[in-house]
Amino acid sequence: MSLSKFNSFQIETEVVSSSECSATVTFFPLERGLGNTIGNTLRRVLLSSIPSPAVFAIRLTSLSHEFSAIKGVAEDATQLIIAIKKLVLRVNEDVVNFEELKSSPIEKWPYLKVRKNKVGPVLAKDIECFPGIEVVNPELRLCEITEEGTDFELDLFCTVDRGYRSSNENRELLNTLSLIPIDTLFSPVLLVDWKVMEEKTTKYGLSDRLRLSVSTNGSIKALDAIWYSAKILVSMFERVAQQPTKLFKLDETDGKSVKQVASAEGGTTTFKTSSIASSPIESLEFSAKTLTILKNGGINTISELISFTPERLAKVKGLEKKYMKEVQDKLKEAGFQLKK
């Protein structure tokens, strides 16, 4: 069966608005029902599968665990960690490759650091970043130094991932007691809203227009997040599409119907498909007129049809040349042919 006429879509994309942290895009025209399908699918991917950098462990001088007080600082360790979780980072993957770092011991990783000894608030802009990492929200307040002579030394270890990782999961990755793991939310997408509107495309036809709005924390541009979510889905479905494609052909050695499975690697496996040949002729999707003629001629299954020679089939009442051609074309599409 040929699916070419069903898998071609003329979809336009219009960027309604776009800024660093928000974007609205419309997709149209979509077949009825596809607006909800695509909108909900993109929403789920946007909220769960967009990667971004985030801090997953810290090191603070003289701090042994996350419930300790910090000498000379108004906040305790728990309050500091809560503030660090709000830190938004942006990564330049052309400069730093976290996938390569994952194979190295954590002690060899580059890290962000804060070195401050003056009384006053410690802000995110006080963080010294290594090449390839930048702070998106520099005015974020981390803590406040309250005592003179306090040497505040904080190291922040970050990585790129997606979704959520608990402190226990991060602890298993560290393999060291010198760092304190923290809960990490990597997802940069804050909000996804989608709406489907019906539009009249022809005199009798209706189509869907999908309006998708996305807000992010600035770690990734909102518009980039939309395109990236679509690429994730394409990548997944490409894997599905690479599964063996079933084609129905004729075995030239004995003239009997067989099914040939062509794999993505190009190899083929052939075996009998009497069950396919016994399928009703409706599965070949003939026109109503041709189907009626064949049925009236006592032909109800594919196996019965391919048992006819062209000369014998031409004698079926009402089967004119144009209907005969349709029969042969449909059989060829399915990998069958009339008896020679």
Image (cartoon, rainbow, N blue to C red):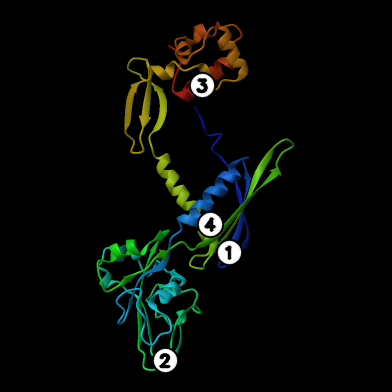
Residue at point 53%, 51% (across, down)? 42
Examine the rendered structure and indicate whether residue 201 appears above or below residue 77: above
- Residue type at mark 1 is Ser
Residue assigned mark 1 = 22
Q: How packed is label 4: few (under 14 Cα within 10 Å), some, or many (20 or more)?
A: many
Q: CA distance from mark 3 to mark 4?
A: 39 Å
User: Regarding mark 3 in the picture, which secondary structure is present there?
Assistant: helix
Residue assigned mark 3 = 283
Q: Residue furthest right?
A: 203
User: Regarding mark 2 in the picture, which secondary structure is present there?
Assistant: loop
In the rendered structure, find residue 226 and report the number of the disc placed on it.
4
Q: CA distance from mark 4 to mark 2?
A: 43 Å
In the rendered structure, find residue 182 and report the number of the disc placed on it.
none
Image coordinates for residue 268, horizontal then vertical, percent: 33, 30
Examine the rendered structure and indicate whether residue 149 appears above or below residue 60: below
User: Regarding mark 1 in the picture, which secondary structure is present there?
Assistant: strand
Image coordinates for residue 84, horizontal then vertical, percent: 43, 73
- Residue type at mark 4 is Ile
Q: CA distance from mark 2 to mark 1?
A: 37 Å
Residue assigned mark 2 = 118
Q: CA distance from mark 1 to mark 4?
A: 10 Å
- Residue type at mark 2 is Lys
Q: How packed is label 3: few (under 14 Cα within 10 Å), some, or many (20 or more)?
A: few
* Residue 181 appears in the figure: yes
Q: Nearer the viewer, residue 190 or 77?
A: 77
Q: CA distance from mark 2 to mark 3?
A: 80 Å
Q: Nearer the viewer, residue 145 or 244?
A: 145
Image coordinates for residue 15, horizontal then vertical, percent: 62, 58
